[in-house]
Image: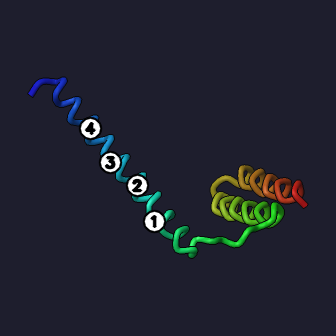
Amino acid sequence: MTTTAMHLKLERGRFAQHLKATLASILPLGWREAMGAGAKPVMSASEVAAVEAQRVREMAHSYSATDPGFAADLYAAASRHEALLR
């Protein structure tokens, strides 16, 4: 097998893998939407900000033992983010 043939075979395999992953992520969503079960409750901007800030605070808590300065920055950023949309 030549290098070109091997390269084409590799690229085709990579493309098929990406296509399969994309279809696997899209098809279930389309099925749920068609069945009406995929409807999510709509959250307000302040509720979304609160959820995002809570995730950042959880990440900050994980860094508090190893890098307290970075954790403090994350806590401050979460508070600012949450306060901007109130």
Tell me the crowding category of disc 1: few under 14, some 14 to 19, or many 20 or more residues within 10 angstroms, Cα based. Answer: few
Residue 12, disc: 4
Discs 4, 1 touching: Cβ within 8 Å = no
Q: How far is mark 4 from mark 1, CA to CA? A: 25 Å
Extreme residue toward the front, this view: 34
> Could you tell me which residue is drawn at 77 percent across and 50 percent down?
73
Q: Is residue 75 left or right of residue 20?
A: right
Identified by mark 3, the residue type is Gln
- Image height check: is 70 above or below 29? above
Does label 4 or label 1 sit earlier along the sequence? 4
Q: Which mark is residue 28?
A: 1
Q: Where on the picture, by quarter, is residue 5?
A: top left
Dot label at residue 23: 2
Which one is in front, 74 or 25?
A: 25
Q: Is residue 6 left or right of residue 76?
A: left
Q: Report the residue marked by disc 3.
A: 17
Q: Which mark sits nearer the N-terminus, 3 or 1?
A: 3
Whether residue 79 sits left or right of residue 14 in the image: it is right
Give the alpha-carbon distance from disc 4 to disc 2, as whole Å.
16 Å
- Could you tell me which residue is drawn at 31 percent across and 41 percent down? 14
Q: Label 1 is placed on what type of residue?
A: Pro
Q: Secondary structure at mark 1?
A: helix
Q: Nearer the viewer, mark 3 or mark 1?
A: 1
Label 2, label 3: how many angstroms apart (C-alpha)? 10 Å
Mark 4 lies on a secondary structure that is: helix
Q: CA distance from mark 3 to mark 4?
A: 9 Å
